[in-house]
Image: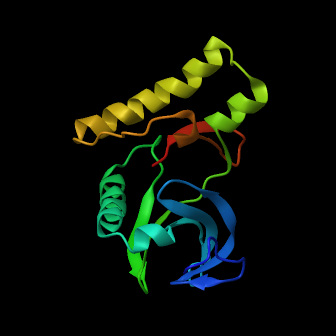
Amino acid sequence: MESSHLAAGTTFSRYAIVRVIGEGGMGAVYEATHLQLKRRVALKLLLPGGVRNAEARARFFREGELAARLDHPHIVSVLDLGIEGDVPFLVMECLDGEDLSTLLTREGPLPVHTLVEILLPVCAAVAHAHADGIVHRDLKPANIFLSRTRSGEVVPKLLD
């Protein structure tokens, strides 16, 4: 996987790539479908530069392992972790919505009551992680996802 992104329709491990969701410092995230289960997931692949870096690979696997230990309604769920060829990957629940950074860019400053509704659940998620000895180290609006449920409810989720 030397190219920046996998094309829609590409198969990676047990997953069919649907589209690129985003790219961060360590990896690219795709919407994908588990081939046998037909379950929609978010598939995070370590970027090519990290694939060749032993420290980046170890950090990527550690992130997956730690995140999978956390079971909290306001933390994105990690469902699987593996390696395909030489590319490490994480499988997470696929969320609909947008991150807080996108919302702030579009709307500007939010009313206090809206921020409280977003940040109290995030604080609970951070406290849950801290109680398990895990420190986030990259808490920012782009890592707070405002997931929209089928009923239209917004559920803040901590990412990364």
Q: Residue at x 73, y 31 (%)?
A: 105
Asked if residue 97 lies left or right of residue 46, the reply is right
Q: Residue at x 56, y 79 (%)?
A: 2
Asked which quadrant contains residue 8, the reply is bottom right
Q: Nearer the viewer, residue 151 or 92?
A: 92
Task: Indicate the position of residue 7 as horizontal and vertical percent values.
Answer: 70, 77
Q: Residue at x 61, y 53 (%)?
A: 95
Say above or below: 111 vs 27: above
Colour treatment of the image: rainbow
Task: Indicate the position of residue 48 as horizontal and vertical percent values.
Answer: 49, 72
Say above or below: 142 vs 42: above
Asked if residue 69 lies left or right of residue 48, the reply is left
Pick the quarter of the image with the N terminus. bottom right
Q: Residue at x 67, y 51 (%)?
A: 96
Say above or below: 130 vs 81: above
Asked which quadrant contains residue 130, the reply is top left
- Residue farthest toward the top in the current orientation of the protein: 112
Say above or below: 78 vs 38: above
Asked if residue 98 lies left or right of residue 50, the reply is right
Asked if residue 32 lies left or right of residue 58, the reply is right
Task: Indicate the position of residue 3 as horizontal and vertical percent values.
Answer: 61, 77
Q: Nearer the viewer, residue 16 or 85?
A: 85
Q: Nearer the viewer, residue 34 or 50?
A: 50
Give the total of numbered labels: 0
